[in-house]
Amino acid sequence: MTQPRPAPAAAESQAELQAELQAELAAARTEIAGLREAQEQAGEREAELAATADQADRAARFLSEALAERLRIDTAGGTRGGGLFKGRQDSVTRDERQQLELIRGSELWDPAWYLRTYPDVVDLGEDPALHFLRHPYYPVRAPSERFDIRQYLIDHPDAVEQRINPLVHFLLTAESQGADAYPPKPR
């Protein structure tokens, strides 16, 4: 038994359908090629941006280290007369000197970050550690990115009541030994 031949109209319809499918396939292939090219361009741009970000990070680290070194020199009294700080601050008391030593010795204190974050301290020409020691409130100022001073004050209102610098308060407690400090929470 032989198979019946398709009617001429059905054959034409099938040919049209096949032509449409081939046209759609060609359009899909063109679109995919365009998307691949766009993806490659986006990858190249991402690589450029990553390289620029790395370069900026290196520059920022270099400047922070240079500033931190300058701060160490100035706060140690290594400059004669014309240091970074203009000497507008009142003299340091013995208690403040001990607290400054504690702050400066802590990994939670970052003087370069403090000056970048609070440029008004630069304008005042004050030693950043002494400024932070004397003015941690109003507005609340953090000693670095690694210490969430607001959360610490919420958890330890006695620091405010006793008028103790929150970082000094933390560093004088057993809580500070081996702790992550008060790292900021993701927002």
Image (cartoon, helix red, strand yellow):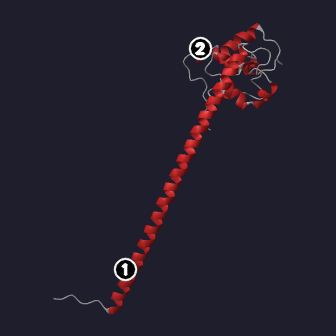
Residue in the picture at 80% in, 28% down:
123
In the image, what residue type sits under mark 1?
Gln
Quarter containing the N terminus: bottom left
Residue in the picture at 60% in, 28% down:
183
* Circle number at residue 127: none
In the image, what residue type sits under mark 2?
Ala
Quadrant in the picture for residue 57: top right
Which residue is disc 2 drawn over? Answer: 174
What x and y, as percent, mark residue 114?
70, 27
Q: Secondary structure at mark 2?
A: helix
Residue in the picture at 70% in, 10% down:
98
Which residue is disc 1 drawn over? Answer: 18
What x and y, as percent, mark residue 15?
36, 84
* Residue 186 in sight from this viewpoint: no
Q: Residues within 10 Å of mark 1 (few under 14, many from 20)?
A: few
What x and y, as percent, mark residue 113?
67, 28
Q: Nearer the viewer, mark 1 or mark 2?
A: 1
What x and y, as percent, mark residue 7?
31, 91
How far apart in space, not on screen, are marks 1 and 2 (Cα)? 79 Å
Q: Is residue 124 above or below residue 17?
A: above
Q: Residues within 10 Å of mark 2 (few under 14, many from 20)?
A: few
Q: Secondary structure at mark 1?
A: helix
Q: Return the residue found at the far left.
A: 1
Quarter containing the C terminus: top right
* Residue 19 in sight from this viewpoint: yes
